[in-house]
Image (spheres, rainbow, N blue to C red):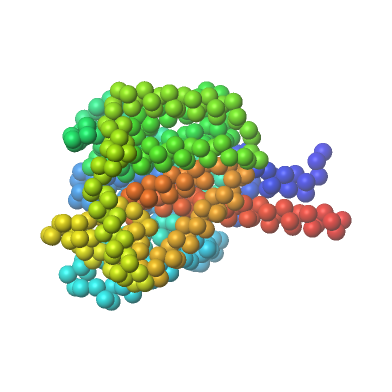
Amino acid sequence: MMPVSQSLHRELWSPSPSRAQSARMATIVGRPIPTAVRWSALALAASLPFEAASLGFTSSSFSFAKLSGLLFIASYFFFYNPLSGKRSFPACNQPLRYFLVYLLICLVHGLFLDSAYWGQYLSVLTTTAQLLLLFWTTSSLLQNSQLARQFVLVFAVSSTLLALGMLLALPGFTVAIESRMGERITSLEYNPNFLAFSMALAALIAAGIALEGGIRQRYQKWLLLSGMLPLLAIVVRTGSRAGIVGFALAFAVYFFPSRAKRQGKTLVLLAIAVVTFTSAMIVIYPTILTRFEESYAGNIVNRRQINQASLSMVLERPLLGWHPVALWEELGRRTGQVWGTKDAHNSFFYLLLEVGVIGAIPYIIGIYLCLYSAWRGRNGPLARLPMALMVCVLCANLAHTYLTRKPQWLVLALAAAVGSAAAQREKNHLAFSRRQSTL
């Protein structure tokens, strides 16, 4: 019989623990997650693809996703607080500290903001604070590899259901947008580019769980992989260039070396199938190809104008920026919209315009720490999945501004969580090695 100490060491240090091992690890490293917290977290994951859908009996701004988020936060702090006697507040991880510095700088900028912008400013500030609260709580919970796997899998399945509803043209699911470059589709009042980003995340999750998520049954693995098809079909039909490029670059992460179980033959076959299916969809629905051709030919006057105006504004006020909300009006004025507003269509430009270099640096450091955490956790239970999701997030934010979107912050939370879990495993391994050397 294996000694207890060696058995425990193997469970804590194994890159791909079983379900029983994951449950035991949760008990060893921390206390078991309460059932109410676990199910409310999974309900939040299931509601995210339908975030833009209202409940019908409330105001249009209150959705099922917001209700799920409120229930999750309420249940979490009911069980995790100093008064419970069992579980206290989670630790403030390194990325969160830098994000909080960014939020503090945004608060200071409010002192110099014209009163005409206060309504929108408070809305943006409140949303950012809520997302940081979500990041704080989920980055702690998702250190449990079993819950992390369930969380991302529920999000992928829910996204697949939305994609199938759109492809089947179910009532209320699909909206067609006609443009000079062809038809683009979306759903539930989503921007087509954000919908493509969300679907790309779900497709990467399906691939990651099937390849590296500990799925043992062959039919379950192929069911997950086949679920990528409707997701990729929606990415193509939205006509989003950033969506398809972000997915392609993120999928390439699965070819990086890892100590996890190798899936070389399956991965190559999957890559061939993905390229073949995506190419066929582009041939059938060429809008996205037309958009790429327009970009290659340089016919992107609007984006070029925005980038030039953004760069000019950054150079004028490099340190402090143009303040939250006010930057949209100034950018709109410089791009020819006298009475309108304009977004920077680039998260890094947006940060520099909003709070300048002083405020952008803490935020960028927080993103870097999440990226490093994902890389550090590449040999853990989820292997390269968090890293692939981070690459997709970074690519999408080069063409769009998703700083206040829940899926992005949950990806950041997952990345921070796997890094913390990897650090805990290394700590346990070192402690075990020291005990063994003293025997």
User: In the orientation shown, which residue stands out farthest toward the front?
Assistant: 297
24 and 412: which is toward the camera = 412
43 and 293: which is toward the camera = 293
Confirm whether residue 95 shows in the render: yes
Residue drawn at x 45%, y 27% as measured from the top left = 274
User: In the orientation shown, which residue stands out farthest toward the bottom?
Assistant: 111
58 and 325: which is toward the camera = 325
Residue 96: % across, % down: 47, 62
User: In the orientation shown, which residue stands out farthest toward the left?
Assistant: 339
Residue 12: % across, % down: 68, 48
Residue 34: % across, % down: 51, 51
Q: Relative to residue 166, is residue 257 depicted above or below?
A: below
Confirm whether residue 107 shows in the render: no
Question: With 81 as the anchor, is 193 left or right in this view?
Answer: left
The image quarter containing residue 168 is top left
Question: With 378 as the anchor, is 368 left or right in this view?
Answer: left
